[in-house]
Image (cartoon, rainbow, N blue to C red):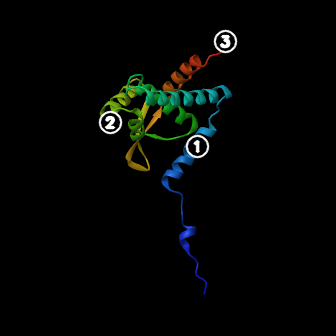
Amino acid sequence: MYSHDDTQSSARPSEGAQRAVESLSEAAARKVSVAERQLVEGARQLLRARLKMARHLPKGLLRDSAWDMILELFIAHEEGGIVYVKQLTLSSGESAAAAIRRIDRLEEAGLIERFPDPLDGRRVIVRLQERGRDAMLAMLMQIFRTEED
């Protein structure tokens, strides 16, 4: 006798997968110019270059964790990614306390915001505010400005 297994039909995407899809959908819905997409790639290149430099120099010598954090948040914002406080803390290369102080300062400056993850109250999401995005676009445009501009 055939018996139907309901475990397959009732399987739902995980909360993390749902959150990722929603975030990517929001990013796709935003109207982004080709120039802005190029700036996102430029931000990614800057972040990679800073990480490579950090491997060859004494810890913290040429590193500004706030800049690295805001680069990561800019890239995530433009691509629909989600960044948690713990990720920023780990990627900063600083102690947890020092990284949290940096996050506090960025938030006080109105560049980023923190809020509890609605799907997992133990996590805190960090997001670039519009003021932070505008500042990053202006800085990246200046960095990658060509002679023709």
Q: In this rendered view, identify the residue nearer to me: 73 or 131.
A: 73
Which quadrant holds residue 98? Answer: top left
Give SS at disc 1: helix
In screen coordinates, is 138 left or right of 113? right
Q: Which residue is mark 1?
A: 24
Residue 108 location, quadrant: top left
Report if the CB atoms under discs 3 and 2 are less than 8 Å apart.
no
Look at mark 3 in the image and give the residue it sits on.
Answer: 147
Residue 74, percent from left and from top: 52, 31
Residue 79, position in %: x, y? 58, 37
Q: Which mark is residue 96?
A: 2
Residue type pointed to by label 3: Glu
Name which residue type carries label 1.
Answer: Leu
Crowding around mark 2 (Cα neighbors within 10 Å: few <14, some 14 to 19, many 20+) is: some
Q: Of circles 3 and 1, which is in front?
A: 3
In this picture, is 4 found above or below 77? below
